[in-house]
Image (cartoon, rainbow, N blue to C red):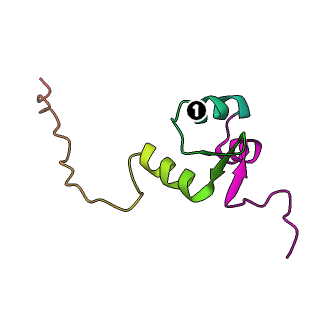
């Protein structure tokens, strides 16, 4: 089994690793986890975060996946320009 490098993102992360992955402070992440705002579970008395669940949660928070959804966009209408006098 190879040793994990410092920058490697693991499937199950502790609060420090998950906070770094999400780009927020560990204190904020602790608050979110204890309020059930973000998907987390406790292993003993320590919070743990699954990367796949965090990724799904982030997709959901950002309005779904980034698959192209084609919507018809109407061109902007311009006001008629008066003729010069």
Q: Where is residue 15 in the image (x, y as percent from the top left)?
A: 72, 42
Q: Is residue 8 left or right of residue 63?
A: right
The residue stretch that appears in magenta: 1-24
The residue where tag 1 is placed is 32
Q: Residues within 10 Å of mark 1 (few under 14, many from 20)?
A: some
Q: In this view, does 72 lie above or below 81?
A: below
**How far from the left and from the top, in percent, is residue 31?**
62, 28
- Given residues 3 and 79, the one toward you in this image is 3
**6 drawn magenta:** yes
Q: Nearer the viewer, residue 72 or 7?
A: 7
Q: Where is 59 relative to 61, above or below? A: below
Image spot of residue 84 (x, y percent): 14, 27
Residue 11 placement, left or right of 70: right
Mark 1 lies on a secondary structure that is helix
Residue situated in front as seen by the camera: 31 or 75: 31
Picture quarter containing residue 26? top right
Give the residue drawn at x 39%, y 52%. Answer: 64
């Amino acid at each position: 089994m190879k040793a994990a490098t410092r920058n490697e993102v693991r499937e199950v992360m502790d609060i420090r690793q998950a906070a770094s992955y999400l780009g927020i402070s560990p204190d904020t992440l602790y608050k979110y986890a204890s309020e059930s705002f973000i998907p987390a579970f406790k292993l003993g008395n320590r919070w743990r975060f699954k990367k796949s669940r965090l990724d799904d949660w982030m997709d959901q928070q950002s309005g779904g996946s980034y698959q192209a959804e084609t919507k018809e966009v109407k061109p902007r209408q311009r006001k008629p320009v008066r003729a010069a006098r």
